[in-house]
Amino acid sequence: MSNLNFLLFGVYPYVALSVFMVGSWARYDLSSYTWKAHSSQMLSGQSMRIASNLFHIGVLFILAGHVIGLLTPHTWYEHVISTEHKQLLAMISGGSFGLVCLVGLLMLIYRRHTQSRVRHTSSTSDIVILWVLLAQLLLGLSSILVSAQHLDGSEMILLAHWAQSVVTLQPELAASFMKTVNLIFKLHVTLGLTLFILFPFTRLVHIASAPVWYLGRRYQIVRQRG
């Protein structure tokens, strides 16, 4: 079990991040025209906009919360908020936006499977990635129920130490922090790393292509002929 723990939480993070970076670079360089969301919004009505907004609002907050929560050292915030209160804040805010995201995602899955025009324009990866995201989201929401059983923040600290050890290139130390955490957290982390592997090969790449450059470009002048 210790070897499997090391492989999953000491080695696998670097495999996932390597595939993420190399795969993303290769796709952008060799197949840049496929680097898009493959939006099917024009094939749907108002419900698509509602579903998309709910999903994206939820997932953006969740991602930001994970990055800040996992990568901020405990010593940086301990004088501002206690570990117990930080865990409670994470449970309430993460749970709220997780439910928002879940509603939007279920609407998108239902639309993808039931609207014939959308279904016919969907690739296998489009459908698979939605179900993988659903599994990951359900694991994340389930982890709130686990955290509610002990509000001391101990597992939250272990997960943060794991993430920070991965970033500082300490695989053995990282794996050691994951030995005692609940199985739900282990599954959530493993599937989250798998999403990094899937990223370069799916429509998820559009996350890295937010058109912020539009804000600084010059206006286009359009004139009528004649």
Image: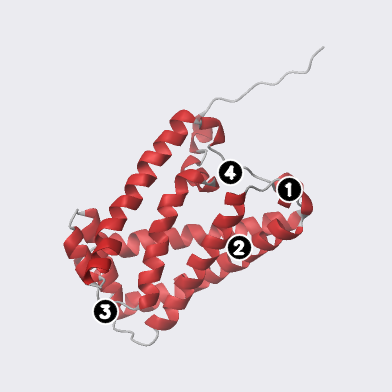
**Who comes first in sequence, dot 3 or dot 4?**
4
Q: Which coloring applies here?
A: secondary structure
Q: Pointer 1: what residue? A: 120
Residue 205 - label: none
Where's residue 34, x and y in %? 55, 35
| Mark 2: few/some/many CA within 10 Å (<14, 14-19, 20+) | many
Between circles 1 and 4, the one closer to the viewer is: 1
Q: Nearer the viewer, residue 163 or 74?
A: 163
C-alpha span from label 3 to label 1: 47 Å
Q: Position of residue 108 (x, y in %)?
A: 65, 59
Instruction: Determine the residue positioned at 26% across, 78% down.
Output: 180
Question: Mark 3 to mark 4: distance in Å?
Answer: 39 Å
Gap in Å between the C-alphas at discs 4 and 2? 15 Å
Q: CA distance from mark 1 to mark 4?
A: 16 Å
Q: Are marks 4 and 2 in contact (CB under 8 Å)?
A: no
Q: Tell me the element at label 4.
A: loop
- Residue 129 percent across, percent down from the top left: 55, 55
**Mark 2 or mark 3, which is nearer the start of the sequence?**
2
Numbered label attached to residue 154: 3
Q: Quadrant of residue 94?
A: bottom left
Identify which amino acid the numbered label 3 is placed on: Ser
Q: In the figure, is residue 23 to the left or right of 42?
A: left
Left/right of residue 26 with respect to residue 177 in the rendered view: right
> Identity of the amino acid at label 2?
Leu
Amino acid type indicated by mark 4 = Ala
Tell which tag, 3 or 4, sits nearer the viewer.
Answer: 4
How far separated are the C-alphas under marks 3 and 2? Answer: 31 Å
Secondary structure at badge 2 equals: helix
Q: Which residue is mark 2?
A: 105
